[in-house]
Amino acid sequence: MGKWAKYEKKHKKEWEREALFKAWLTSNPNPNSDVSSYCKVCETGLRSHKSDLEKHANTSKHKQQACKVDKRQLPLPSFGISVANNSIKKRNNIGLLRSYSHNYSKCRPPDRHH
């Protein structure tokens, strides 16, 4: 057992506000899980160690899932965004995808000609 293994790590809400994590990290919705963090993009539980979360963000699986985000059309409320009308929704959606894609250089922003 490592030096820090006896200390339980818990999900920290402040991580959800950091640029690298804000579009996909949340607390695990499964109360019976051994891990307390959750990736909304990969739909998987994660150990609540910040370095593990950073490593997860750079995995090929996560990057591939993140590039598919525009095709899967995740609802904006899953990212913590509520909208008032369709024009605002469209602008927010494009802005959100560009912001999210910025962290993943292989992703291209969506066309604006819809």
Image: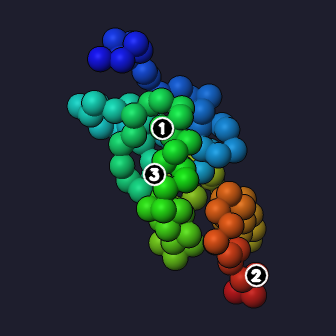
Question: In front here: 22 or 102?
Answer: 102
Q: Residue 57 appears at what percent x and percent y?
A: 54, 50
Q: Which mark is residue 40?
A: 3
Above or below — where is 87 with respect to 1? below
| Residue designated by label 1 | 52
The quarter of the image holding the C terminus is bottom right
Work out whether mark 2 precedes mark 1 in sequence or the reverse, and give the earlier one.
1
Q: CA distance from mark 1 to mark 3?
A: 16 Å
Q: Element under label 2?
A: loop
Query: Please, what is the three-letter code of the amino acid marked with disc 3?
Result: Lys
The quarter of the image holding the N terminus is top left
Residue 2 showing in the rendered view:
yes
| Residue ID at (76%, 81%) | 112
Q: Which mark is residue 30?
A: none
Above or below — where is 62 with respect to 108? above
Work out whether mark 3 precedes mark 2 in sequence or the reverse, and give the earlier one.
3
| Residue designated by label 2 | 112
Q: CA distance from mark 3 to mark 2?
A: 25 Å
Q: Element under label 3?
A: loop
Q: Residue 62 appears at what percent x and percent y?
A: 48, 58
**Closer mark to the observer between disc 1 and disc 3:** 1
